[in-house]
Image (cartoon, rainbow, N blue to C red):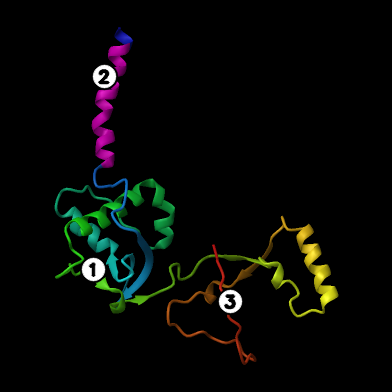
């Protein structure tokens, strides 16, 4: 009996702490959103993109929510690396709460808060402007293997790749190759044209 009483007392005492840990966070987001790095004037910030139209300055939106006293203080990310590092440690729930507050208060219609801007009013930067390393995988499609070779050598190269398909071909890119939307692509000296591709990079 004493053991049950002690366990019940511990659970009762722990309950406010658990509940407090959930204050200011949400388990679900009212709307899907994207995250990015944006420049408004001379101010660079991490922002939420809602409805592919609005960019919400995370730090300013969070400060506005905290000023209502309904939300405990929780620092916002300085950059996208910080977002990723802390996403599953409570950051996600706060982002959901910001989205939900905007949607439920109808703040995206009519006169919007100053921290909600049209996407056209900001400049979209590279999400992580200077990553420490960029590792890409090459030859993801057999059709790209030795595509300019004669049929016989090409067939041999494809067969070799199929036999070795569990070992990825990796290559690095310079961090300076990352740019934002609309920025100038610098062509290396001695080159006259560039080939475009679509890459998925991590």
Residue 137 image position (x, y, % from top left): 64, 65
Q: Quadrant of residue 119?
A: bottom left
Q: Secondary structure at mark 2?
A: helix
Q: CB atoms at circles 2 and 3 under 8 Å apart? A: no
Question: Residue at coordinates 26% horizontally, 29% vertically from top-left?
Answer: 15
Label 1 sits on residue: 116
Residue 183 image position (x, y, % from top left): 44, 82
Question: Residue at coordinates 28% horizontally, 34% vertically from top-left?
Answer: 18
The earlier-in-sequence mark between 2 and 3 is: 2
- Say whether residue 172 is left or right of residue 40: right
- Say whether residue 137 is left or right of residue 39: right
Instruction: Please state the extent of the stretch shown in magenta in the rendering.
Output: 4-22
The earlier-in-sequence mark between 2 and 1 is: 2
Residue 33 image position (x, y, % from top left): 34, 61
Within-10-Å neighbours for mark 1: few <14, some 14–19, many 20+: many
- Say whether residue 63 is left or right of residue 159: left
Judge whether 140 appears above or below 2 on screen. Answer: below
Label 3 sits on residue: 197
Q: In the rendered view of the protein, which quadrant contains the N terminus? A: top left
Within-10-Å neighbours for mark 2: few <14, some 14–19, many 20+: few
Label 2 sits on residue: 9
- The alpha-carbon separation of the residues under discs 2 and 3 comes to 62 Å
- The alpha-carbon separation of the residues under discs 2 and 1 comes to 46 Å
């Amino acid at each position: 009996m004493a053991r049950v009483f002690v366990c019940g007392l511990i659970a009762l005492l722990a309950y406010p702490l658990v509940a407090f840990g959930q204050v200011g966070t949400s388990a679900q987001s009212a709307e899907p959103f994207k995250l990015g790095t944006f420049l408004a004037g001379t101010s660079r910030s991490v922002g939420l993109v809602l409805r592919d139209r609005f960019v919400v300055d995370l730090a300013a939106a969070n400060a506005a929510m905290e000023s209502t006293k309904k939300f405990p203080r929780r620092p916002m990310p300085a950059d996208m690396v910080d977002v990723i590092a802390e996403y599953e440690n409570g950051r996600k729930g706060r982002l959901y709460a910001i989205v939900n507050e905007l949607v439920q208060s109808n703040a995206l219609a009519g006169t919007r808060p100053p921290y909600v801007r049209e996407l056209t009013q900001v400049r979209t930067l590279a999400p992580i402007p200077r990553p420490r390393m960029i590792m890409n995988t090459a030859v993801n499609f057999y059709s790209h293997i030795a595509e300019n070779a004669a049929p016989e050598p090409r067939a041999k190269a494809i067969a070799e790749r199929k036999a070795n398909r569990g070992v990825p071909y990796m290559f690095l890119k310079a961090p300076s190759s990352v740019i934002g939307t609309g920025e100038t692509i610098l062509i290396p000296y001695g080159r006259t044209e560039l080939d475009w591709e679509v890459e998925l990079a991590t």
